[in-house]
Image: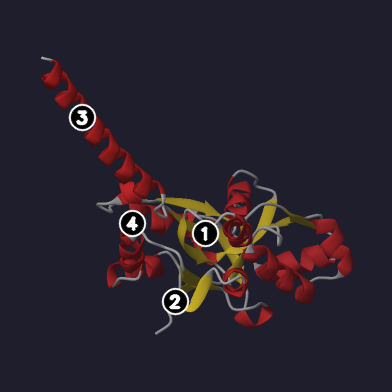
Amino acid sequence: MLNIFFTKLLIISMFLLVLLIFTGCDDDRTKIIMVAASLEEIVHSEYVDTVDKDKFFINYGGSLSLARRVEQNQKKIGAVIFASDYSIDLLVKKGIIDKKNIKTLVNNSLVLATKNKNQSYEDFMDKINKGYPYKIVIADDKLAPAGKYSIQIVDKLFSEDIKNKNFISSGDVSYVSNLLMYNDDYYGIIYKTEAIKNDLDIIYEFPNHLHDEIVYKIGILNHNNNLSINNFIDRLTSKNALIKLIDLGFKVEK
């Protein structure tokens, strides 16, 4: 009886050891993709339909703030999808991503948007230049590339007096979009795709020469060891996914 007891104890111990080994290996696997908040709709829809979604998860936010989080704690992060070259370059310079592991996904544009309907851009500009107290919200340039692009536009089109009195900078582009949805009196400079997604009225689409190119790039971190993350990136760059991105207002360079 004693031998049987020890035999069973040995089997249980071996089972627990094997389990511990595999669990430990799994803990060492990269499990996170950091994604620009403005891509959440399409990325989430593809993620939900992914068979092995239990092998990784998505973290959304402003590209600049996400880049800094990757820089500070990169162990569990396997890939990023950011809305600016600058955000990607931060990680390239730190040796976290190799240039050969970067690819362009899509492009975007910026628009002046509001929940109010039937207002022309000419009327808007005429009133604001005459001192009408419009409140215009843009993303925080310290958190999100949309903020940096918006400031480039604002500096070219508006006086210092208007910039000081009429503009508010806060959050990332998704935060600004949500603010516009629930505040009739606010206007905002946001991505065209955000305006379309939230059924906001587009007063004006700003010409590309007013700001740096808005390009979304994918970067695979050098230490990524999660095949499921690589497969998901392939899914996002497939023909079907790109068609969905175009339908959402993104531009795909041919």
Q: Are marks 4 and 1 in contact (CB under 8 Å)?
A: no
Residue 224, percent from left and from top: 42, 63
* Residue marked by disc 2: 103
Q: Earlier in the sequence, mark 3 or mark 1?
A: 3
Residue 84, percent from left and from top: 58, 71
The quarter in which the N terminus is drawn is top left
Q: Residues within 10 Å of mark 2 (few under 14, many from 20)?
A: some
* Residue marked by disc 3: 10
Q: Quadrant of residue 137?
A: bottom right
Dot 3: element: helix
Dot 4: element: helix
Q: Nearer the viewer, residue 80 or 9?
A: 9
CA gap, disc 2 to disc 4?
19 Å
CA gap, disc 3 to disc 4?
45 Å
Q: Earlier in the sequence, mark 4 or mark 1?
A: 1
Number of the front mark, 3 or 1: 3
Q: Earlier in the sequence, mark 2 or mark 1?
A: 1
